[in-house]
Amino acid sequence: MRARYRIPLKTAAGITALGAACVGYAAGIEVRSFRLRRVSVPVLPRGMHPLRVLQVSDIHMVGGQRKKQRWLRDLAGLRPDFVINTGDNLSDPEGVPEVLDALGPLMEFPGAYVFGSNDYYGPKLRNPAKYLLERASGRHGLNGNPPAVGAIHNPWEDLRDAFDSAGWVGLSNTRGRIKLPGGQEIALTGLDDPHIKRDRYGEVAGGPETDADVSLAVVHAPYLRVLDAFTADGYPLVLAGHTHGGQLCVPFYGALVTNCDIDTDRVKGLSTHRAGGRQSYLHVSAGCGTNRYTPVRFACPPEATLLTLMPRED
């Protein structure tokens, strides 16, 4: 009888040990293995000098995350032409001072921002397995959700005031412009977070502003209704975050979920989107943080992205 069960028991023990090792790696190592992604996108007019854009997203700051703070501060050494923050800076109502400390050096550069749901409301504890099953089966949140009843209010107003004081342009259902020291003007059109149904595209519809050097679209969550609208209106590039790149991915396979209705093949990095007979580039940042209740990443390290906007070849 013992011999009959020896191999299965060893196998079970091995699987358990492997699972424990993966959890330890995901929670203790990869979640703090910050990376910089570099991408080139041909969206500028011919003959224009390239521009470097630093995109930061999904910081989800929790008190005591010193390594993340240092890494974010050090990004200022890249000296981007401007910064785009695509939201979810908070995962803790007490995290505003640490977010501002981490982003302080970057706020010396021109920039713009949108907010995500976790800037407005604190996250709630949920069963991660239920989360994965709901999203993989398409039963939850594919058109966004209103805030949960009793959601904890985060002090997003303090973030807004600090960003505005630094000269960053707020883009919640509005348009704005960044004028660079070299004289270039960047027109920006932004939406509030579609994940909690705060987007109002009708308030910003009309397409790119032709008197700017380039027009870009910015949103936290890359829901298809938003991507379709921006693309059909003719924006050459849409910047988004929210997905965490899938957060828990399978090596050599990729993400299992996206937390919105975009397909898993475009859960992070640069891709394209087609709508209304037009095509836009889409860049989705995998972000550099996690929900405070699921502080793990696997096969999806935390990141920021330095995008080099290049002249179009056509």
Image: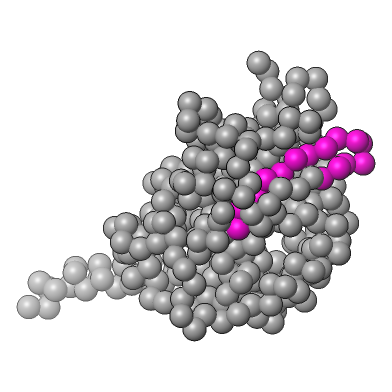
Q: Can see residue 11?
A: yes
Q: Residue at x 86, y 64 (%)?
A: 165
Q: Can see residue 32?
A: no
In the foreground, 45 or 89: 45
Left or right: where 222 falls relative to 263 = right
Left or right: where 136 falls relative to 62 = left
In the foreground, 133 or 239: 239
Task: Specify the quadrant of the image occupied by residue 85.
Answer: bottom right
Q: Which region of the structure is painted magenta?
A: 178-192
Task: Specify the quadrant of the image occupied by residue 106.
Answer: bottom right
Q: Is residue 191 magenta?
A: yes
Q: In which quadrant of the rendered image does the C terminus lie?
A: top right
Q: Position of residue 308 (x, y in %)?
A: 73, 36
Q: Eyeballing the image, is 222 above or below 40? A: below
Q: Position of residue 288 (x, y in %)?
A: 63, 60
Please, which residue is most extreme toward the top here?
314
In the foreground, 13 or 165: 165
Q: Position of residue 161 (x, y in %)?
A: 79, 69
- How many numbered circles does the render carry? 0
Please, which residue is most extreme toward the left here?
1
Q: What color scheme is it?
A: one colour
Q: Eyeballing the image, is 122 above or below 203? A: below
Q: Is residue 195 magenta?
A: no
Left or right: where 255 falls relative to 309 = left
Q: Residue at x 42, y 77 (%)?
A: 126
In the foreground, 236 or 50: 236
Q: Residue at x 35, y 70 (%)?
A: 129
Q: Residue at x 74, y 61 (%)?
A: 71
Q: Position of residue 202 (x, y in %)?
A: 57, 48
Q: In which quadrant of the rendered image does the N terminus lie?
A: bottom left
